Amino acid sequence: MEETNSVVQHIRAFNRFYTDLIGLLNKNLLNSNYSLVEVRILYEIHIRESCQASQIMTAIHIDKSYLSRLLKKMEKADLIKKSPSAQDARAHLLTLTQKGREVFLKLNQASDKQIEGLISALSPKKQQAIVGHMQSIMNLLTINSAEHDSNSHQTE
């Protein structure tokens, strides 16, 4: 138990370090007028070109009512457009407006520059080491999550 607690504390310390380092706790992301979750919603719509709100909920594990409020706000700000789905009249498709695309691309570029600034003083070998470690973390946590899901279905 003590060893697990130590691991947990190290992970939490890293989370605090990294969120502070890249400014994720600021009210607005990258000196913009948008929060982290709003920018993430723009990203999710951008990578799919169009999607339903349920796809965003699944992708970012966000509460339905919170997402609904954010989508209304973003639609009012002319960042997204909601239109009826051709396949299901009950469903709506979300797409980025021209303004939404411009905002997303500008913030995406700013995020790239921010990360480039963080790693620019590191040698290419150290940059690749960071990428390798991050990929390992993602792989381990994905495997752990899949094993957990598999085990929880077996007990049902």
Image (spheres, rainbow, N blue to C red):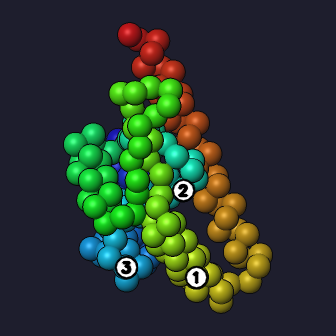
In the displayed structure, does residue 1 sit left or right of residue 140?
left
- Bin the neighbour count of mark 2 within 10 Å (Cα to Cα): few under 14, some 14-19, many 20 and up: some
Residue at 40%, 57% (x, y): give it: 80
Quadrant of image for the N terminus? top left
Lower sequence index among marks 1 and 2? 2
Mark positioned earlier in the residue sequence (3 or 2): 3
Image quadrant in which the C terminus is located:
top left
- Residue ID for mark 1: 113
Does residue 125 appear in the picture of this structure?
A: yes
- Is label 3 in a helix, a strand or a loop? loop
- Residue identified by numbered label 3: 32
Task: Determine which quarter of the picture holds residue 83.
Answer: top left
Marks 3/2 in contact by CB < 8 Å: the verdict is no
Mark identifier at residue 151: none
**Secondary structure type for disc 2:** helix
The numbered dot on residue 46 is 2
